[in-house]
Image (cartoon, grey):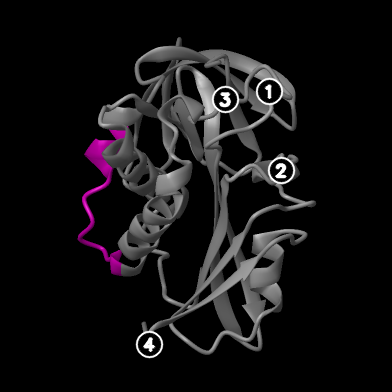
Amino acid sequence: MERLNIDIFNEIDSTNDEAKRINLNKDFHIIIAEKQYKGRGRLGKKWSSPDLGNIYMTVCTEKDFSYMPLSLVIGVICKKGIEKFINNNDIELKWPNDILYNNKKVGGVLVEKEVIKESTRTIIGIGINLNIKKEESWWGDLSKYKLETKRNKLINLIISEIIKLDRHYDWIDAWRNGCAHLNKEVEIYKDEEFIKKVIFKDIDEDGNGILQNKNGHERISSGQISIKGIY
């Protein structure tokens, strides 16, 4: 396609970091790796990225997506994409950027902004575990569905949906319907310190979480806030 470049690496530090180094000369630049040795998730957490046929990729663009909460929107795109290949609706979402299967984290989205030469790059990192060593109890994969042979088709589907994204994309109800913890009690943490337990009631159009506590409702943005108690 004339609108995009694609780089594929056997091994790289981080596809998101590579997106900050490249010369962006088309609308979109896609970076895909078989293995990352400095893969990371939100809040700087390590993302295990072994060479096991998983999806580690970044979509880099200067297109303005500031009108939508990209982490949540990309989560919806990934959920829908995966479900087309597993033929069920068992993929769930955890606010703001986790992808779950069977109460285990199988994927995540890391959106970053980088100002380079007076232009702002939007960097969308996506990791999906098709098959992974069980290094931590909360990690899961989709090995049950043997998606290795469908990996490239899934990658292409996700990329094509991101390229088509505009302000008319109907994501909010899809996110609500896929949320693993809507109307359930969750634990709120800030910088790994427990703050309180609340009911996760909803999200708004900006992607903020709407929480219910004994004093009423409050909104939280992702920032340094995490929710736990889901898996």
What segment carries the magenta color?
164-176
Labels in figure, total: 4
Asked whether the viewer can see residue 206, the reply is: no
At horizontal 21% and vertical 50% (from top left) the residue drawn is: 170
- Sequence-first disc among 2 and 3: 2
At horizontal 61% and vertical 30% (from top left) the residue drawn is: 226
Q: Is residue 177 magenta?
A: no
Amino acid of disc 2:
Pro
- The quadrant of the picture occupied by the N terminus is bottom left
- The quadrant of the picture occupied by the C terminus is top right
- Sequence-first disc among 4 and 1: 4
Label 4 crowding class (10 Å Cα cut-off): few <14, some 14-19, many 20+? few
Residue denoted by label 3? 140
Which of 25 and 173 lies nearest the eye of the viewer?
25
Residue denoted by label 2? 50
- Sequence-first disc among 2 and 4: 4
At horizontal 49% and vertical 17% (from top left) the residue drawn is: 103
Amino acid of disc 1:
Lys
Asked whether the viewer can see residue 78, the reply is: yes
Q: Residue 202, percent across and down?
A: 34, 28
Q: Could you give the CA–CA distance between mark 2 and mark 4, rounded to whole angstroms?
A: 32 Å
| Residue 37 horizontal side relative to residue 158, left or right | right
Q: Residue 109, percent across and down?
A: 53, 47
Label 3 crowding class (10 Å Cα cut-off): few <14, some 14-19, many 20+? many
Residue denoted by label 4? 2
Amino acid of disc 3:
Gly
